[in-house]
Image (cartoon, rainbow, N blue to C red):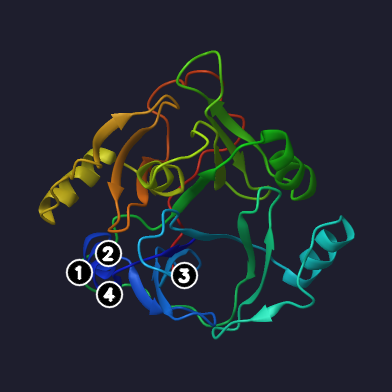
């Protein structure tokens, strides 16, 4: 996931010192910095075109084993694609499309050069980003792209009331990570609402242990951050907020109880195998 950051020094304190993720220069043409949760997954921060942008989300990325084959497949199915796949500094092959609601989506075939594994304190609070979410409006239109074309499948759905669905989790076709449609926002959301909906989620075995680790790192929750909470999906979570307002939804891999609204229809995520 790539996000706009107004103050990279503050962001570095959050992602490197607090989360413990490995810092590396951005790999594309834009200047910025990446913070790796593992050798494939990272949050990339870049400078915005102007200060104080309401929407901090720039792009969400997914791995593919063959970027060129996927580019050709999407083109054959009516999706506007670039004329060629690009190559980043680490050898990764990448191309970008817009989904039906205009969200920028990267597809990345991993290169041969990986960042070095963390060797010193602070150790990472999580080594696996299990999902990312974004503001969504038309589920059927999005499903045509993510489900019908790309092969994502429903993992779980639910809402704050039985009369409507607020969250739709679409799991990748060959893994356990998922994309979450955030369907509940008003027509003109605030920056805080956008930052909460356009989020990402590092997985942990225990939120209680995570809270202890945060306390040891002198974390004091702000008014926008949330202490451990048992979500309607049956999983414990703890919300942090980065310096630009993006919600970081730490979530346990396994549910602690049966979810509301609907059963899980896919496998549960696990900690990443390592670097």
Sort mark 4 into few (<14), some (14-19) or many (20+) by Cα contacts within 10 Å. Answer: few
| View extreme (bottom): residue | 89
Sort mark 3 into few (<14), some (14-19) or many (20+) by Cα contacts within 10 Å. Answer: some
> Is 47 rendered above or below residue 165?
below
Q: In this rendered view, identify the residue nearer to me: 44 or 137.
A: 137
- What mark, if any, has residue 20 been given in the picture? 2
Give the label, 2 or 4, closer to the camera: 2
Q: Position of residue 222 (x, y in %)?
A: 18, 45
- What mark, if any, has residue 39 been given in the picture? 3
Q: State the separation of the CA atoms marked 3 and 1.
A: 18 Å
Q: State the separation of the CA atoms marked 2 and 4.
A: 11 Å
| View extreme (right): residue | 76
Sort mark 2 into few (<14), some (14-19) or many (20+) by Cα contacts within 10 Å. Answer: many
Q: Can you identify the residue that label 1 sits on?
A: 121
Q: Position of residue 200 (x, y in %)?
A: 43, 50
Quarter of the figure that contains the C terminus: bottom left
Q: In this rendered view, identify the residue nearer to me: 237 or 138.
A: 138
> Is 34 rendered above or below residue 141?
below
Q: State the separation of the CA atoms marked 2 and 3.
A: 14 Å
Q: Position of residue 257 (x, y in %)?
A: 40, 22
Give the label, 2 or 1, closer to the camera: 2
Give the label, 4 or 3, closer to the camera: 3
User: Image quadrant of residue 205?
Assistant: top left
- What mark, if any, has residue 119 been given in the picture? 4
* Chain-order first, disc 2 or disc 1: 2
* Chain-order first, disc 2 or disc 4: 2
Relative placement, left or right, of 19 versus 221 is right
Labels 2 and 3 touching (C-beta < 8 A): no
* Chain-order first, disc 2 or disc 3: 2
């Amino acid at each position: 996931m790539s996000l706009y950051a107004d103050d990279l020094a503050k962001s570095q304190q959050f992602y490197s010192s607090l989360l413990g993720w490995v810092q590396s220069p951005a790999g594309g043409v834009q200047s910025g910095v990446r913070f790796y949760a593992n050798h494939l997954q990272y949050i990339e921060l870049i400078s915005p075109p102007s200060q104080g942008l309401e929407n901090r989300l720039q792009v969400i990325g997914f791995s593919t084993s063959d970027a060129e084959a996927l580019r050709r497949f999407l083109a054959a199915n009516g999706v506007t694609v670039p004329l060629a796949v690009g190559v980043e500094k680490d050898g990764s092959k990448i191309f970008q499309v817009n989904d039906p609601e205009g969200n920028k989506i990267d597809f990345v075939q991993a290169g041969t050069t990986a960042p070095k594994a963390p060797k010193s304190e602070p150790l990472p609070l999580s080594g696996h980003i299990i999902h990312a979410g974004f503001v969504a409006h038309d589920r059927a239109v999005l499903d045509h792209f993510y489900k019908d074309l790309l092969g994502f499948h429903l993992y779980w759905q639910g809402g704050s009331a039985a009369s409507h669905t607020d969250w739709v989790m679409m799991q990748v076709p060959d893994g356990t990570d998922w994309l979450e449609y955030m369907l509940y926002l008003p027509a003109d959301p605030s920056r805080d609402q956008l930052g909460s909906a356009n989020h990402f989620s590092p997985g942990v075995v225990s939120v209680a242990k995570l809270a202890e680790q945060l306390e040891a790192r002198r974390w004091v929750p702000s008014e926008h951050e949330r202490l451990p909470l048992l979500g309607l999906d049956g999983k414990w979570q703890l919300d942090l907020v980065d310096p630009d307002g993006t919600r970081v939804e730490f979530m346990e891999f396994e549910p602690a109880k049966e979810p509301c609204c609907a059963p899980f229809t896919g496998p549960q995520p696990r900690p990443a195998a390592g670097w």
